Image (cartoon, rainbow, N blue to C red):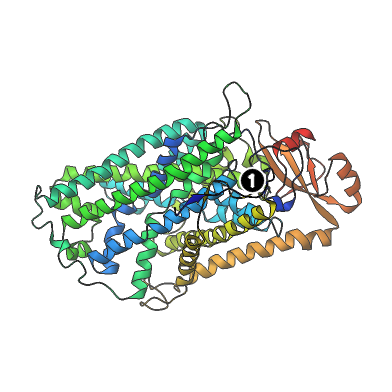
Amino acid sequence: MLFKKRTSISTPEKDTNSTAFSTVSSISDHIPTPVEDVNPLSYSFGPFSVVILILQGLVGTGIFATPGTILKLMGSVGSTYVLWITCFFIPLFSSYLYIEFAGYFPKRNGGDVAYLEAAYPRPKFLVPTVYAAISVVLSFTTSSALAFGRYVLLAADAEVTTWHYRGIAIGALTFACIIIALNTNAALKLQNLLGIIKVLFMLFICVLGWVILAGGTRVQDPKASFRNMWEGTTTDGNNITKSIINVVFSYGGYRYAFGVVAEFVGGKTKDGSPVDEELHHRKLMKTYGIYVPVSLFVIFILYILMITSYYASAPPEEIKNSGMSVASLLFENAFNNKHATTFLDVMVAFSAFGHLLTAIISHSRGLRECGRQGVLPFPKFWTSTKPFNTPLGPIFITWLVNFIMIIAPPAGVAYQFIVDMGSYSGYIFTLCAICGLLTVRRDRRLKGLGNKGHYLPLPAIIILLLFEIMVIVMAFIPPKEGLKGSNGQIFYATYPIVTIGLIILCVIYYFVWRYTLPNLGGYVHREVIYRGENGEIGNTIVKVKLDDLEQWDKEHSTDDNGVGIVEELGSISSSSLQRDTVFVEKNSVESK
């Protein structure tokens, strides 16, 4: 088997992330943030919702347009099939990477934010600080909102102007955030309904392709694209690399499902009795270990069939030069009917909104985990789940950042530059996550914990590493258009340089905050675990003057790791709040 389950042959220690403990863990235990054994966000995500999260994350609007772009870059139909088939293995391998992480940390939401924190506990607070800053500044879901606005205008046969579709995008973003903030179950029901509609529409396109190939439509020569399939194949390495990146990106989005791992159903019993941790873990790993890759494979098959339908609707040259999306060209050639193209625009708008819902749900959980780590100011704002058992603070920040992104940057180069920065930072963090899995495995092996759940073979990890390195390096290779790139306005490598510069700036801030300021100010940092009114558990940092240190430690039962305990966040009154992570489980709070 390529992806197999492993168990340790040594006598394992207790896995401190899966069960509650009454002791403070060391830094090397990979539990920087206290685990919420009973999740205050509740447990709303069952197997079906996880599958729909995968679907909504992968299928936005790209599959309705990207195949035409890939054909232009690659030159031939045959070469595009090779890419769509072979590039599927990148997200497939990557999904198993996150499945393995989920097996190690089943009670942590947030995906990358939790896994990177566990993989890089030293220097203390460095990775959480950098990730939190970049996540707040550069994590966007605006593309789905803007696409929704455009397709709504197209469906209404209205003029598509910048501020018209931006206005609709703001409305869609606001509505999505409100429903997610008020009721997670209601948001999931809407997401699941849109997911079912999306699958039916994708199947409709697949069947339409078969009808076209059978000669059942007005398309004159449905097999034109499949003659001389390799004619015109490009040898331009830049075009091939761009195509690979675009195809892999079209398979992206599965990670949204890993942002809600801790909310998987069964984490709490109805009568309040103790949960069977092993049974819950098995159900979790069955859902993520089986349903996630199966869902990816089903979507892969649908993609190939949809692309075949696009190619059946027109010869390659018409697809390249039509100026229309491949889906629009398909409906135009197959039906030549205004109602049909309107139907297409409505379905793509639904698809975009479904993706928007999924992105906000997952991203808000990631921001909440950043807040629980203690790396953001005002911890109660980030971690509180009152009054609706939803992360209102992170949802508001998600809305605010994306609202600014919709209205502030001028359309064109400036907007694309900011979006490219967000994508590029994502590739860097993914590379760190891949390397981080190896460090987590090493530390677990040294402790005799073994491997829980699915295990991704090393050759697959190497493939993922090489791909991420290729994407990161490719941003610095000059395009054939010259140093100003295809837009002809700014230096082609500006966005990777600025992104890396921003990360370096965060690192510099960390060292100043962590070491320089305490030395100059005559104080030390102390970590504090707090409990919120709704059962939230998190961590924050306080500054304690050296003269007051001994008394402060006595009052807060500080342990050898510099971790103190308070029952309520409001009781931290003697110090100004800062940021940090902590290494205590929920029962540690109770036992203290």
Q: Residues within 10 Å of mark 1 (few under 14, many from 20)?
A: many
**Which residue is at the front of the view, 212 or 357?**
212
Q: Which residue is rendered at x = 38% and y = 43% of the image?
A: 353
Query: At which x and y percent is residue 236?
Result: 32, 76
Residue 309 appears left or right of 139: left
Residue assigned mark 1: 371
Query: At which x and y percent is residue 357?
Result: 43, 41
Query: Of helix, strand and loop, which one carries label 1?
Result: helix
Q: Which residue is rendered at x = 87% and y = 39% of the image?
A: 555
Q: Which residue is rendered at x = 58% and y = 25% of the image?
A: 269
- Which quadrant of the figure contains the C terminus? top right
**Which residue is at the front of the view, 37 or 580?**
37
Query: At which x and y percent is residue 281?
Result: 56, 38
Quadrant assignment, res 534:
top right
Residue 60 is at least partly visible in this image: no
In the picture as drawn, the residue positioned furthest to the top comes out as 271
Q: Which residue is rendered at x = 49% and y = 50% of the image?
A: 4
Q: In the image, is residue 253 above or below residue 291?
A: below
Query: At which x and y percent is residue 495?
Result: 49, 67
**Which residue is at the front of the view, 98 or 319?**
98
Residue 529 appears left or right of 159: right
Residue 329 appears left or right of 408: left
Q: In the image, is residue 399 above or below residue 522?
A: above
For the image, the number of numbered tags is 1
Residue 503 is at least partly visible in this image: yes
Residue type at numbered disc 1: Gly
